[in-house]
Amino acid sequence: MGLFATMPVDEVTVQDIANAVDMTPAAVYYHFASKEQILLEGMTRFRDAMLSEIRSDMPEAGNAAGVGELLTRTITWTNRHRTTATVYFVGSIGLNLLVEALRRETRHELVELLRQAVVAARGRLSSAEAGVIAVALVSLLETSLASMLNQDATFRSLGARRFRDEVVALGDRIAGIA
């Protein structure tokens, strides 16, 4: 995944992958049909770990700060897994149909988890309102993580701590908690 994080995916070769893991290209092909399969496997592992982390951090009912805390922990966790996160949130966008299907499936799962977090934090909400809030939070999270991982102009101008604090504050406003 380190190669995919530092080079465009279409420029990474099986020979590069084999060299990085001290194998021959034939040995790589024994385990994987293509470099795209390697990429998809790495992205799936990242996605599974991220969703597991979010599930373990879900707020308890009545915890009004729960959505912000969940966003903070997700941003921190993603930063700790920066290499693979960069591939997932930045380098793989629009790469191929399988990658986009994985990203779409992940988005659906994130929407459901964030819907649950909003309901836990705010209490009774209509299903439609909770769903729309969750979609907005997923968009905020994905966009913010890409900004952080790219260290774009907005991220650099605010710095890591203030950027995270602003994302969390916006998330709370979206969730109707602010």
Image: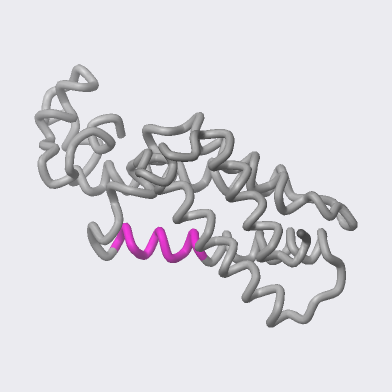
The quarter of the image holding the C terminus is bottom right
Give the percent coordinates (x, y) of residue 131: 65, 74
| Residues shaded magenta | 98-107
Q: Residue furthest right?
A: 62
The quarter of the image holding the N terminus is top left
- In this rendering, the answer to whether 9 lies above or below 177 is above
Can you see residue 53?
A: no
Can you see residue 47?
A: yes
In the image: residue 120, left or right of residue 160: right
- In this rendering, the answer to whether 143 lies above or below 115 is above
Give the percent coordinates (x, y) of residue 60: 84, 51
Give the residue displayed 14% in from the left and 38% down from the top. Answer: 12
Residue sitting nearer the eye, 131 or 145: 145
The number of numbered badges drawn on the structure is 0
Helix, strand or loop: magenta stretch: helix
In the image: residue 157, left or right of residue 22: right
- In this rendering, the answer to whether 92 lies above or below 96 is above
Q: Residue furthest front?
A: 157
Q: In the picture, residue 18 is in which quadrant?
A: top left
Q: In the picture, residue 109 is in which quadrant?
A: bottom right
The coloring applied to the image is one colour
| Residue 63 magenta | no
Residue sitting nearer the eye, 143 or 40: 143
Give the residue displayed 33% in from the left and 43% down from the top. Answer: 87
Give the percent coordinates (x, y) of residue 106: 49, 59
Give the residue displayed 53% in from the left and 54% down from the top. Answer: 141
Q: In the picture, residue 172 is in which quadrant?
A: bottom right
- In this rendering, the answer to whether 36 lies above or below 23 is below
Give the percent coordinates (x, y) of residue 45: 45, 42
Q: Residue furthest top?
A: 22
